[in-house]
Amino acid sequence: MWDENDPVDATALAWLRERPGTPVEGIGIVTRIWRLAHLFGEDRRQTLAAAGADAATLDLLSVLRRAGPPYQLTTRQLTEQTRVTAGAVSQRIGRAERAGLVKRAPAADRSSRAVLVTLTPAGHALVERLVDRVLGREADLVASLSAAERATLAGLLKALLDNLSTQLGPHRHSQVGSS
């Protein structure tokens, strides 16, 4: 089960040697997920930086793009879908608006305080380029696994994430690789 030449397994074996009975079952999973998250996050950060963007901008523009025409959502919907705080969404919108990637306008319903955020043509063009680059790169990074292995791994990770969300509660998150 344990490969002493593997650094993660070696860590588990060292704990077992030094503290027999220590629960090390999670080390092989959690440590590898942390390392993968770091590697994927750093690669995404570099890919986006080379394209002149960052993870927060990609997240905002992607949510608007996936909404379909007219590529418009309220700030509340953006907060819910990006799963970051309202303050973080407001900052992201402000940066994207200054860059000409989105525009804000009051909702048509004058009795509402809702603000609509719409993807501009420049924002649409950028997100199209970024999605192709990022998702293409990520597909390349997992291409060493067969289609069946990718499907199995995705299913196992989903099950683990669902279970952790139930145990720990839903948490807001930042994009891996963002600061």
Image (cartoon, rainbow, N blue to C red):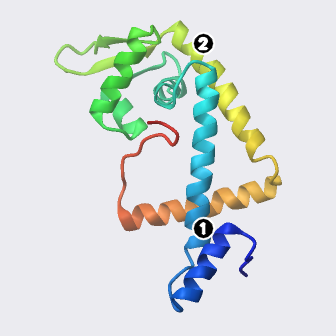
Viewer-proximal residue, 125 or 144? Answer: 144
Query: What kind of element bears circle 2?
Result: helix
Tell me the amino acid under the disc marked 1. Answer: Ile
Viewer-proximal residue, 46 or 135? Answer: 46
The numbered disc on residue 125 is 2
Query: Which residue of the protein is positioned furthest toward the bottom in this rendering?
Result: 20
Q: Quadrant of residue 50?
A: top right
Q: Residues within 10 Å of mark 1 (few under 14, many from 20)?
A: few
Find residue 172 and report its horizontal and vertical position in percent: 36, 46
Q: What residue lies at 65% left-to-right and 31% top-to-bottom?
A: 134
Residue 74 visible in the snapshot: no
Tell me the amino acid under the disc marked 2. Answer: Ala
Q: CA distance from mark 2 to mark 1?
A: 38 Å
Q: Left or right: where does residue 155 sit relative to residue 140?
A: left
First-in-chain label (2 vs 1): 1
Find residue 7 and report its horizontal and vertical position in percent: 67, 67
Query: Which residue of the protein is positioned furthest toward the front in this rendering?
Result: 18
The numbered disc on residue 29 is 1
Query: What kind of element bears circle 1?
Result: helix
